[in-house]
Image (cartoon, grey):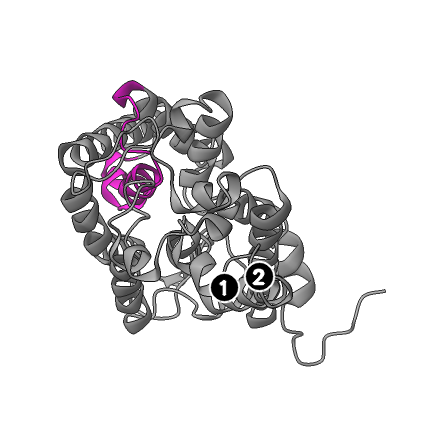
Amino acid sequence: MMANNVMFLKSSPHFQDHDSVPKIMYVVIISLLPAIAASFYYFRLKALFLYLACLLGCLATEAIFLKVRKKPLNSLWDGSAIITALLLAMTLPPDLSLELAVIGSVVAVALGKQVFGGLGHNIFNPALVGRAFMQIAFPVAMTTWSAPVTLSLDAVTFATPLGNLKFQDAISQGTLTSLPELLWGNIGGCIGETSALALILGALFLLFKRVIDWRIPAGIILSLSVFTGIFWMVDANKYAIPVFHLLAGGLLIGALFMATDMVTSPISTRGAWIYALGIGLMVGIIRLFGGFPEGVMFSILFMNTFVPLINRYTRPRILGERRQA
C-alpha cells in the first residue's frame, strides 16, 4: 500500500477495498453465532466450557508468541485467534476434557500459525492443525460421543450419523439418520457441526458480505455430490444418498468456514475450483472406502499443501508476459 510515498509490502490476506483484517475476522465470528447458539442448545454447559477452554488456550498462546517475537499485543484482538478457538471448539466432541481442549488450542496457534510467522504466512488452517493433532494423540477421547441433552441415550453406545453409516450398516438396518434430524442438529457429533441449518445461515451472511469465495463451497459440494451419487445410483442399499453426505459430519463447517480461509486457499478463480473439487473428491473417497467415517479434516489439510503450487500455475498471465519454459 502507499503511505507518504513509501511502499509497504504486507503479507496476505490482501483486500481491494476498505475492509481491514479485524473487520473481516469479526464478520466471520458473527457468522458462526447461529452454529454456536445451536451447540449451546443441544449440549448446554459442555459446549460453553469447551469454547472457554479453547479461547483461553488460543489467546494465551498468541499473546506469548507476540511477546517473544516483540510484536504489539494489540494484534491479539484482530480476531484471528478467536476464530481459531471457535472453529476448533466446534469440531470437538462434547465430553472431551477441558485440558485436552487447551492442549489442542496451544498446538493450533503455535504449530498451525505462529511457527510460520503469524497471520498471513501459515499454509494450513490453524484450527484443523490442532484438531488433527488431537485426533492422532488422543484418538479414544476424540471418538467418544454423547447424545444431545434433548435425547435420553447412553453416551457409551451412542454413534454419530457417519459412524452409524460406516460401522453399523445403517442403511440395511434401517437406522440411517434422517435428513430433518441432520438439518436441525438433534444428533450426536462435534458440538458445532450437528446443525446444518445453523451453519448454512451463517454462510449466507458471509456470502452476503462477500467475505468468502462461493466457488470453494460450491466446488466441494459438487464434487462430493457427484462422487457419492455415482455409487448411490449403483447400489442404494449400500451407499447413502448424496444429500446425507452433505448434511452429515463436518462437511458444511469445513466447506463453508475452513476451506474458505482466505490465507490458506487459492487466490485465482481456476485455482479455487481445482482446490475445491480436490477436497470434495477426497472426502468422498475417505468416507466410502477409508478407515475413518469422516474425511473433511484430512482433505482440507491435504489440499492446503498444494495451494502454493496451485497459485503458481493458475495465476492470470500479465498482458505481454512471456510464458516460461
Task: Please tell me which residue is depicted at 47% across the width and 57% down the height of the picture.
Answer: 245
Quarter of the image with the C terminus is: bottom right
N-terminal of the two: label 1 or label 2? Answer: 2
Residue shown at 60% from the left, 37% from the top: 291
* Cα gap from disc 1 to disc 2, whole angstroms: 6 Å
Q: Which secondary structure lies at badge 2? A: helix
The answer, for residue 69, to whether it is visible in the render is no
| Residue, far top | 99
Amino acid residing under circle 2: Thr
Towards the viewer: 2 or 59: 59
Q: Which residue is mark 1?
A: 242
Mark 1 crowdedness (10 Å alpha carbons): few <14, some 14-19, many ≥20:
many
CB atoms at circles 1 and 2 under 8 Å apart? Answer: yes
Q: Residue furthest right?
A: 325
Outermost bottom residue:
319
Q: For residue 225: magenta?
A: no
Q: Which part of the image, by quadrant, shows the N terminus? A: bottom left
The number of numbered discs placed on residues in the rendered structure image is: 2
**Residue on which the image places disc 2:** 228
Q: What are the residue bounds of the magenta stretch?
A: 72-99
Indicate the secondary structure of the residue bearing disc 1.
Answer: helix
Determine if the magenta segment contains residue 96.
Answer: yes
- Where in the figure is residue 222, as x and y percent of width and height? 53, 69
The x and y percentages for residue 154 are: 27, 29
Q: Seen in the image, is 317 located left or right of residue 1?
A: right
Q: Quadrant of residue 63?
A: top left
> Which numbered marker is on residue 108?
none
Q: Amino acid at mark 1?
A: Pro
The relative height of residue 285 versus residue 230 in the rendered view (above or below) is above
Disc 2 residue crowd, few under 14, some 14–19, many 20+, Cα 10 Å: many
The percent coordinates of residue 174 (x first, y second) are: 42, 52
User: In this rendering, would 172 be left or right of 204?
Assistant: right
